[in-house]
Image: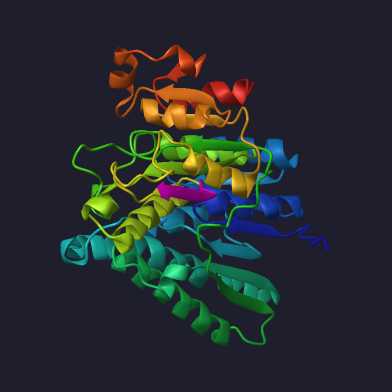
Amino acid sequence: MRIDLSGKKAIVSGSTAGIGFGIARGLALAGAVVVITGRTQERVDQAIDALKQETKSGGIEGVAADLGRADGCQALIDAHPDADILVNNVGIFEPKGFFDIDDDDWERFFQINVMSAVRLSRHYARGMRDRGWGRIQFLSSESALNIPTEMVHYGMTKTAVQSISRGLAKVLAGTGVTVNAILPGPDILPPMNASKLVILDRDGVINEDSDAYIKTPEEWRPLPGSAAAIARLNHAGYRVVVATNQSGLARGYFDQAGLDAIHRTMAAHLEGAGARLSGVFFCPHGPDDGCACRKPLPGLIDQIVAEYGDVTGVPMVGDSLRDLEAGVARGCRPVLVLTGKGRRTLDKGLPETLGPVDVYDSLAGFVDQFLKDPS
């Protein structure tokens, strides 16, 4: 079924990347004139150019405004007084313990995630009602129902968004204007081509490494540019998976629930950049447990092969020798990044048994070159 939105104008808040960008793309492909919004003109211009290239549509416009403020919402309204479709997508997240969330944090999350949608819906719904047709979508989250303990403030806003959408739907019943809420999870992006895969180590490649281990969501700190690099791989059609040793489980530094919380934090950060991981494969064992999955042994790579097929030639990106050895054992292309322990690994010297090893300053540097020449 093809939806024809020719002659309709759609506004998508927070749409320079991620879910918002994907929604804007779908609306443009359906024939709508689409208004992109973002906080900076540079990001808005980049998104407009990307959408025009992908959709071959000339009906892409944009507004740079801070929609977490009343004057930012008004700037959008002044630039585009009427719309037929409104998608309230803009939102922020931040892993933080409940007792560390101060009043300013609560207010900031409420203004951006909730009041932006209230202000825009209050304006645009009037025109839709008067014209007898309109569509308003609120982007909630699965976190509205399953509140993450490390992001209670975020979950609160997403529950509020659901309540507003339900109430507004009742207010506009019978007017020709429909209102709905969408509850996406981290797998919202379209499926990738299974033949295109990149394998990453976690600590030292995606996030900062620590000799004291990453034990809590608060200790998980992304490396600059890593999320954007993964997003670029996704947008180019690549699945990205992680293969990581997590002996902190065996050592008692954290439990499975703690590791899951760390990975939810990672997924949320990536989602905010328009990126996703197709899978996280981890070894829970210690160095003396005699398992087959602790790198440099290739057990984790074997798990990836079982799910995705032959990995010959697939990049295995890591910051340590054990990462590269695990990948090479199953025919992967070894890639060393100099973040994390990478510089130390390079200075020690790489064994000839690895064969040629590509070396880059960071994951972003690798992706820059890889997308130019994947061979």
User: Residues in magenta?
Assistant: 275-282
Quadrant that contains the N terminus: bottom right
On the question of residue 184 being in view, the answer is yes
Q: Residue at x 36, y 72 (%)?
A: 147
Q: Closer to the camera, 85 or 238?
A: 238
- Residue 280 lies in magenta, yes or no? yes
- Residue 142 lies in magenta, yes or no? no
Q: Quadrant of residue 341?
A: top left
On the question of residue 66 being in view, the answer is no
From this view, report whether residue 106 is shown above or below residue 195: below
Residue 158 image position (x, y, % from top left): 42, 70
Q: Is residue 166 left or right of residue 147?
A: right
Colouring scheme, one of rainbow, by chain, secondary structure, one colour: rainbow
- For the image, the number of numbered tags is 0
Q: Closer to the camera, 83 or 262?
A: 262
Residue 112 image position (x, y, % from top left): 37, 60
Q: Is residue 76 left or right of residue 194?
A: left
